[in-house]
Amino acid sequence: MAEKSFKYVILGGGVAAGYAAREFAKQGVQPGELAIISKEAVAPYERPALSKAYLFPTGTARLPGFHTCVGSGGERLLPEWYTEKGIELLLNTEIVKADVPSKTLVSAAGETIKYEILIIATGSTVLRLTDFGVEGADAKNIFYLREIDDADKLVEAIKAKPNGKAVIVGGGYIGLELSAALKINNIEVTMVYPEPWCMPRLFTAGIAAFYEVYYSNKGINIIKGTVASGFTSDSNGEVKEVKLKDGRVLEADIVVVGVGGRPLTALFKGQVDEEKGGIKTDGFFKTSVPDVYAVGDVATFPMKIYNEIRRVEHVDHARKSAEQAVKAIMSTENIEEYDYLPYFYSRAFDLSWQFYGDNVGETVLFGNDDPKAENPKFGTYWIKDGKIIGAFLEGGSPDENKAIAKVARVQPPVESLDSLSTEGIAFACKI
Ligand code: FDA
Ligand code: NAD
């Protein structure tokens, strides 16, 4: 079998890979030195589009429209860009074995790829209901969403089931964004999740109440406090019903499952140090093994601002960690240690929120959180040890969003929670 050899290899062709490639080019990588290996068939793209405009009936996003790095307002790197730079894109290539001591990767087709320096950017995969042994969970038209192929299958199903019924399993990011996308496609939507409110790993009960009422007003049926315990299918093997643990049964033509992700670290088990479910790195994304770096969803890195090591499954960190690793590899100048301020966001219907910082401590809700308001604008501050350490804002202007980012970074002291609630976003804007 063929053997290829590169100075730099990025394993994974997602968001981090695209931003790393751009940084390699900036730092003067030479033609033939860099390869990106991806099991996907397309050059790196902005994954967040898959749960948003990719699924819209109008104004639909399609490649090449959302290749990296357009998501952060940067240059769109088309496949030709990689060719021009002499960066090899090894697409449709799944690596099934990594031997770190010999710096060798082996593909499913048996090809060997050698590297001098490796960046692991394999991202996450979805948790599947079949992994938990849920009865009937392998029926047709039960979908997960991670890659463009998954999105294409879902788009086909939406077209095949006009005015159909969908059940969305999970009340996190995928649950909330996909419920909206399917509803916009005239599908009747029911969401099911086990917790007392949606997006519990970030939202407070107060924040969630706004979205739950807003979604209900859009005609989305929400069932909380239970899980999908089984599925029945018709004679074609297509899903027909979702059985809930509380005994209820829901009809369904389409099911979308978003019950969380898992970082893809298995190829490196026992070869690099791991922590908190990811590959342990320093503030330059170096792993425990020389010449091996890990970025994006798979990296567990020092979050300097909180003096803690953490893993982050969001696009802003994928972009920034990739750039940091490449600078650390290529730059002749001194690089500052990564100093990341967590930034998460989501968009659905006409809504758009941003969050910066840490969501621990006491909370203060402010603003107009009436789901029926024409332009609702509300937020929440998180306060710990007398200082604001996190801020959430729905419906903010670009300047207001910048202001909440600054508040979370500066961590100003707070004297009275009552006056903070009254002042609301104005407090952030004056920092
Ligand atoms: P990413 O998953 O982007 O890329 C990993 C790549 O590695 C994939 O191409 C994969 O095929 C490849 N790969 C894995 N194993 C391989 C192997 N063995 N061989 C070859 N290739 C392999 N975040 C956010 O902040 N805002 C948002 O709105 C969204 N929206 C969103 C929507 C959807 C549908 C998803 C799935 C995720 C988001 N996210 C998000 C999260 C964000 O997209 C995610 O954190 C980044 O894509 C992570 O970037 P990585 O490059 O680490 O992994
Ligand atoms: P998530 O962790 O956001 O949410 C999972 C949800 O499923 C939680 O509410 C959880 O309690 C619930 N759940 C768990 N088991 C369940 C069960 N058996 N039945 C019903 N519900 C169950 O994960 P996700 O929404 O699947 O997202 C997957 C990945 O994609 C994450 O990495 C996420 O960060 C990323 N993503 C991010 C965005 C964004 O940042 N805007 C958008 C889409 C996806």
Image (cartoon, grey):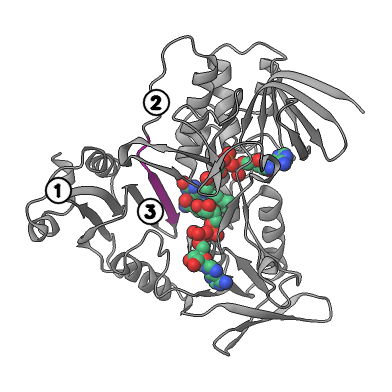
**Amino acid type, residue under disc 1 in the picture:** Ala
Is residue 229 or residue 385 the one in the foreground? 385
Mark 3: amino acid: Ser
Where disc 2 sits, the SS reads loop
Q: Residues within 10 Å of mark 2 (few under 14, many from 20)?
A: some
The residue mark sitting in front, 1 or 2, is 2
State left or right for residue 345 relative to residue 76: left
Quadrant hosting residue 209: bottom left
Question: For the residue labelled by badge 1, is the local secondary structure a helix, a strand or a loop?
Answer: helix
Q: CA distance from mark 1 to mark 2?
A: 32 Å
Sequence-wise first label, 1 or 2: 2
Label 1, residues with CA under 10 Å away: few <14, some 14-19, many ≥20: few
Please give the residue where the numbered disc 1 appears in the rendered image: 426
Q: Which residue is mark 3?
A: 352
Q: Quadrant of the C terminus?
A: top left
Q: Is residue 140 magenta?
A: no
**Is 345 covered by the magenta stretch?**
yes
Rendered image quadrant of residue 189: bottom right
Task: Look at 35% across and 49% down and name the residue there.
Answer: 354
